[in-house]
Image (cartoon, helix red, strand yellow):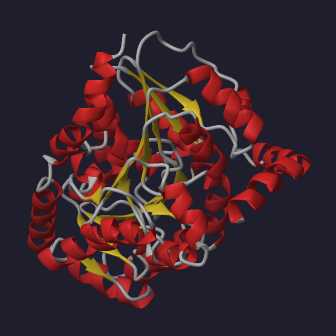
Amino acid sequence: MMLGLYRAATQGLAPLVDLYLAQRRRRGKEDGARFPERRGIAAHPRPAGPLIWIHGASVGEALSALPLVERLAARAAILVTTGTVTSAALLAERLPANAFHQYVPVDRLPWVRRFLDYWRPDLALWLESEFWPNLMLETAARRIPMALINGRVSDRSLASWRRMPGAVRTLLGCFAWALGQSEEDARRLALLGARHTGCVGNLKYAALPLPVDESGLARLQAEIGGRPLWLAASTHAGEEALAARVQARLKAEIPGLLTLVVPRHPARGPAIAQELAASGMVVARRGADQPIAPDTDLYLADTMGELGLFYRLAPLVLIGKTLTAAGGQNPLEAARLGCALLWGPRMDNFKTIAARLEEAGAAQAVADENDLVVKLRRLLADAPERAKMGAIGIGIARAEADVLDRLIERLAPDLARLDARP
């Protein structure tokens, strides 16, 4: 009944859907040049032969999928879909030959059917937990083999999904098999009705180090010189102002201290810069090509796809979306590059990875702003401890590098069927 109401609503409320999408375009959350793709209109010719479709929500899933895409692109053409502008920009730079990106269609039946009619995928792999009912049900109705990989069921999702067990069981039933990114995720998927569940490891461990422009890195290193610094990475609203307050409290004690801030959404850059400058900080904004001067307090890196550059610059990193917002970001990206890690109490989306890093000594949790000041003060003064934490993090990030091999092994029957197609 729940799914029937949803399908009826996406049809009957079509004008409201159009209004909502128009608002998103005005706010820069939709790609105006490629907006027809959101209506299921292709911008790329369908390659001849087998086509594997991989879908994820945004940047995190896209980065997790890249090693898998590179491995599978030798076997078939790869269509990767996501729903965000940032993920599209990242994939445009990093997808291998024989792979291409399209925006996932908005979940209205006419647009979903247009998408599937055109692409006719031979295998569909869904990443993590973004479930679009119309798209899933239509794909299953066409007997396109579907599997869930690196599935994640957070505490919040488990609680909400258990309130509509029939709908969730139907959606999970679209997947021939489902892999959780942890044994607990696999257990929860089975509890909710998924078939043939299991865990081969977390695909995030297979990701390659984030890329860097070496010349840009050298320029920033020259501008910074020997100044002590820390990085607030992938920040959300409120965390930039918090970083400014921390900088103000510590710079009198730590001469030359520099705070780097990389907002999760670079389009917020001008507003963030204005907010930070109003607090009395000397701010340099990368998006406006402003250099780091000797008196710069905060360097705002409001650019796309440069997190790898700033992880290489900063020996000490606070993971954003953990103090003023909940969820966190993937800490393995920073750990892989040897950063000592801090995060707030709301690392909800990466609990297993975060616990592993904390227990091993690669990361420390901070309770609040005051605790962050205390831990930054200590770690900024203790280079050997930072180096030790970074080395432990590198080891953990590399510990499950073979997860991709195990996933390919699990995919072997599906790939064999593709190979056998005329």
Q: Between residue 385 and residue 73, name the one nearer to us.
A: 73
Query: Where, by quadrant of the figure, is residue 104 drawn?
Result: top right
Identify the residue at horizontal 69%, vertical 46% (top origin): 29
Q: Between residue 320 and residue 142, name the one nearer to us.
A: 142
Pick the quarter of the image with the N terminus: bottom right
- Numbered circles on residues, count: 0
Query: Where, by quadrant of the figure, is residue 28 drawn?
Result: top right
Q: Position of residue 135 (x, y in %)?
A: 62, 43
Q: Is residue 234 left or right of residue 415?
A: right
Q: Is residue 75 left or right of residue 78?
A: left
Identify the residue at horizontal 64%, vertical 24% (top origin): 117
Q: Position of residue 128 (x, y in %)?
A: 42, 55
Q: Between residue 210 and residue 218, name the one nearer to us.
A: 210
Pick the quarter of the image with the C terminus: top left
Question: Can residue 38 be spotted in the picture?
Answer: no
Question: Can residue 336 be spotted in the picture?
Answer: yes
Identify the residue at horizontal 76%, vertical 35% (top origin): 110
Q: Is residue 85 left or right of residue 381?
A: right
Q: Is residue 27 above or below residue 54?
A: below
Q: Is residue 92 above or below residue 169?
A: above
Q: Is residue 10 above or below residue 297?
A: above
Q: Is residue 224 above or below residue 233?
A: above
Q: Position of residue 374 (x, y in %)?
A: 31, 87
